[in-house]
Image: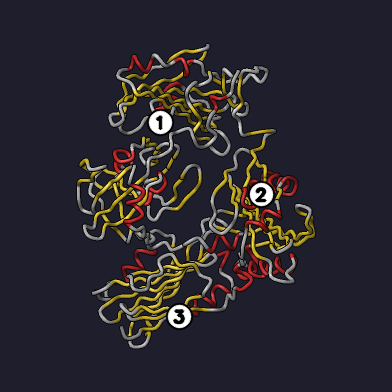
Amino acid sequence: MVLNRFARTSLSFLLVIALFFSLALSASAADEAAASGLDIRLKAGSGSMTVNGKAVAVQAPFQQSGTTYVPLSVMTKGFGASLQLKDNKIITLKYLTHTVVLTIGSKTAWIDGKKATLAAAPVVVQGVTMVPIRVVEAFGGKVAVVAATKEIRITSATGAAAGTGGAGGIDTDAGKSRIGDSYFEWSMNYPTGLAQNFQSDNGDYLSFQDVKKEFYLSVGAEEAEEPMDAAEQLDYLKDNVLYDETVLDSKPVKRSGLTFQRVVAKSSETGFYYDYRGIQANGRFYTLSFGKKAKSVDELNASSSILDSFEVKFDASNKALKDLTKVKDGLVAFANDDYGLELKLPPDWVEDSDGDSSAYYYNETSDLSFYVYSAPSGDTAAAWSEKYTDKFKKFFAETSRTGPESSDIVWNGVPAKQVHYSYLTDTGWSEEYDIFAVRGSYKYMISLSFDKKDKAKGDEALQLVLDNMKVDFSQVERTIGELPDPIDSEKLEEVVAKKSKKYGYSVSIPKYWVGGEKDFEKESVTYSGVGLSFLIAVNPDTKLDLYPDLVQKQYTSSGVMELTDKKEIAVGAAKGYEMSFKIVAAKEGDGGLVKLYLLENGGNVYLVQWMVQNPNATEFNLKQLDDVMKSFKFTES
């Protein structure tokens, strides 16, 4: 539902504040895990860590905005994870059956193929990448603080051998001499002795490893329609070479009448030698990687037959060829056992974890959410859907929306309401279909939104939802307890009073607003609603004199914002300024309004500000924003 997505999006453009992530695990729990596994100890400000008692030099960990940062060497030298750096910012860590993808400067991460949000974004300090310590939990690590010594302790029980999870065990298929993917059009000799330990949602990337972790094999197929020459293909391939690897050879090889770009490298940390190969065919770029714990390149080359066997075709008539594809009849099957949910979608869709829904899927231009809530006595699909449509009208201006239009349908054998509407955002027009159904003790909502420019694919996804989404209602009744829908008790007009004792102010915030930074004893707080943001920032021990001109200059110098009003005001005994700006709209959906107070009180300067996007500048939103500003008062600290 569009309202859920907008409410979770912080639009504050002045401050980027890391979310607090505490080290809450007990040391006793860590002791138990460490009894037969990994024990890493390090301390903020110290350039040394110990791994099972052995000292290792590292970039010193540090704390910032409540988050502890540690160097990547905790994962590579401590856990033994492999590391790959792409475009000097995308980091891929692999350990046992786990794969973690991080991006420098971004809180978004991918853990074993699922999207996650970090406490803070990875940063580079003195040439070393530092990441939030909780990243180690993706590898099964546990984090605790030893109270007596202030040491940070990371423990992990001995991990299961690679290949025991995921799809696993392909080497039990008697009679199969080759593997491949019929959709991505490749095949190769059967990797005897290796087990599949990872496969992406649509199967465009998969990897294999042996139990002793002495061999590694991966195959990737990325869309690449635009023809690349040999040099461009080589550059594309080199993105797979890890930062700690020394390139030993770089020249093409010809196999089966095809020319592959090839790079041979050695890892200085693990002692592995790697044979990377790449080729463009079938509108894709295929990347192969074979790693071996070896003493020389000759030892690596002795195992090169596995890559030599790779072909950019799939012979469906070959009975000795095992098809590993996840794409059947052009669709990928997704399932959620807890909800008995089954759904088929095109191969460009990815499954994700969404905090408020039981299942979430997306591709480049579309989002699909599946929600389950408890059904209050007497609730109906019609009454339920009206609550959402009424809320939608409050938050989208009439000039920035069409609909909602409601119709009766049957979904999953249940009478349902389908609501269709469009709305304008800063990225253009989006179209959305929401389906509401009530059955037994629960009610179900499916929300599909897509870029209006991609309407054909969006309509295709809607038809797939109507045709093949299956829910085992009895499984829901067995598995799920009480899950109230917030909208059933939500009162948008209700506010909650907030107070800062340290900085001596109070303010009343709508209860439904989502807090980003919401500790009022800190120098800044941020909240967001649907298409709007609100912040309070305090600069201690300073004077107001320079701020009005400085803020006006900073806001307007780029030409993106225009000052529309400026006047002197007083909030209680505090003097200051009220300033209003218009954000210039470069295209339809862009633009918005900004209002702020600049006030001096008790030796501190206060910035109180709201911003709303043009499509969401409704009478309801504007009144609430002004009410919040008017509620701001100074109190005795």
Q: Using the image as rendered, state which of residue 538 and residue 241 is in the foreground.
A: 241
Q: Amino acid at mark 1?
A: Asn
Tell me which residue sits at (71%, 48%) in the image. Answer: 470
Vertical placement of residue 221 versus 621, above or below: above
Mark before the other along the chain sequence, 2 or 3: 2
- Check the image and name the residue furthest to the bottom: 573
Q: Which residue is mark 2?
A: 341
Where residue 76 appears, as percent x and y from the top left, is 32, 38
Tally of numbered tags: 3
Where residue 120 appears, as percent x and y from the top left, is 37, 55
Where residue 6 appears, as percent x and y from the top left, is 55, 61
Q: Are marks 3 and 1 in contact (CB under 8 Å)?
A: no
Vertical placement of residue 68 versus 351, above or below: below
Q: Amino acid at mark 3?
A: Ala
Q: Residue 330: which quarter of the image?
A: top right
Q: Which residue is mark 3?
A: 497
Q: Using the image as rendered, state which of residue 29 and residue 358 is in the foreground.
A: 29
Horizontal side of residue 357 vs 555, given as left or right: right
C-alpha gap between disc 2 and disc 3:
41 Å
Q: Amino acid at mark 2?
A: Leu
C-alpha gap between disc 3 and disc 1:
53 Å
Which labelled disc corresponds to residue 302? none
Q: Residue 317: which quarter of the image?
A: top right
> Disc 2 or disc 3, which is closer to the eye?
2
Mark before the other along the chain sequence, 1 or 2: 1
Label 2 environment density (alpha carbons within 10 Å; few <14, some 14–19, many ≥20): some
Tell me which residue sits at (76%, 59%) in the image. Answer: 416
> Disc 1 or disc 2, which is closer to the eye?
2
> The N terminus lies in which quarter of the figure?
bottom right
Using the rendered image of the protein, determine whether residue 16 is visible from the camera's viewpoint.
no
Mark 2: secondary structure: strand
Q: Which residue is mark 1?
A: 240
